[in-house]
Image: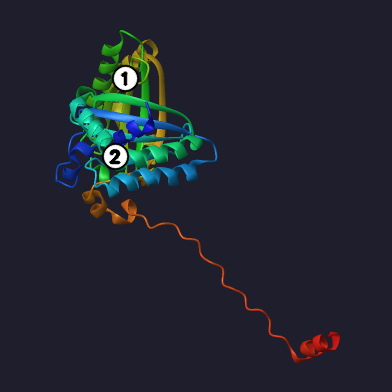
Amino acid sequence: MRKSLMILFATCLLAALAPQVLAQTPPAPPKVMTIFREDVKPGRGTAHEKLEAGYAAALRKAKWDSYSLGLSSVSGVGDAWFLTGYPSFEAMETDHRNTEKNATLSAEFERLDEQDAQFRTNQRMMLCVLQENLSYQQNVDVAHMRYFEVITFRVRPGHEAQFAEAAKLIREASEKAKTPNIHWATYAVMSGAPAGTYLVFIPLKSLKEMDAAATDKSVAMAMGEEGGKKMEKIASEAYISMESAIYAFNPRMSYVPKEWEDADAAFWKPKPATVAKAPMKKAPAKTASAKTSTETRQ
């Protein structure tokens, strides 16, 4: 599928409920999420970012009613993610059709697609469904977040119940430890990745939060020795692999609601980078002796 038919999915995790982001109670994540991922060629990250800003500009010009959040990798492979939230697959399909009907927007996407191909080595589209029972305090004010830690789990066929048991153990331990600042939303990948793939999104306001997490033993203590042994057993029996990566919110590749911009304009509406011009040097004035010497040579 052409990227021009996929980029409409490049909408933020909470786009379906974005106008409520600044409400007293943050909205819940959408039921359906799509992820468009691009593997970026080494050394082409800056050029790729500039090109991707064109997609956001096209959506902004069209006053589109879905809002794109671009993520740039901080760790892991060099890639960029674009997340979309929808209340249903039907809503996703409607957005898709509306994009195809908009000749101007479609033409601009196709033009950008041709240029974007030079910056990426691969691309992948994933369709995901929220697993509320595997999430914890998932209602988050994403407008003030700056990173997602994304943990990718590959679960062995037939071991989904053990994965759910592990999530339950961590949730119960977090509640017992009284950790109000811990949040995560878990999505099961329905299409676009190997069966048994789950993505856990952990929002972060800054990487400073990882310093505290590295030394905080409260959840492990609340889980206890027995719970810890259960977790180890589940990991050895149920998981094929587990990988963690950090992604930074990239405002230049994003098209977010006005409410987000009002919440933090300095971040969501960055000024274009400018290069200071070096002052022009004046040519040294000729002295009388130099002038005389010149006239003599003539």
Q: Quadrant of the N terminus?
A: top left
Question: x, y percentage for residue 187?
Answer: 27, 25
Q: Mark 1: which secondary structure? A: strand
State if disc 1 and disc 2 touch (CB < 8 Å): no
Q: How far apart are the two marked residues, 2 and 1, measured between alpha carbons?
A: 28 Å
Q: Quadrant of residue 211?
A: top left
- Residue highlighted by disc 1: 191
Question: x, y percentage for residue 263?
Answer: 24, 52
From the viewer's perspective, is 90 left or right of 207?
left
- In this rendered view, identify the residue nearer to me: 120 or 298: 298
- Residue highlighted by disc 2: 103
Q: Along the polypeptide, which appears first: circle 2 or circle 1?
A: 2
* Other-residue count near label 2 (Cα within 10 Å), few / some / many at <14 / 14–19 / ≥20: few
Kind of residue at disc 1: Ser
At 21% from the left and 32% from the top, the residue drawn is: 86
- In this rendered view, identify the residue nearer to me: 94 or 119: 94
In the image as oriented, which residue stretches furthest toward the front?
103
**Residue 296 position (above or below residue 69):** below
**Residue 255 visible in the picture:** no
At 20% from the left and 22% from the top, the residue drawn is: 133
Question: x, y percentage for residue 107?
Answer: 35, 40
Nearer to us of marks 2 and 1 is 2
Kind of residue at disc 2: Ala
The colour scheme used to paint the residues is rainbow
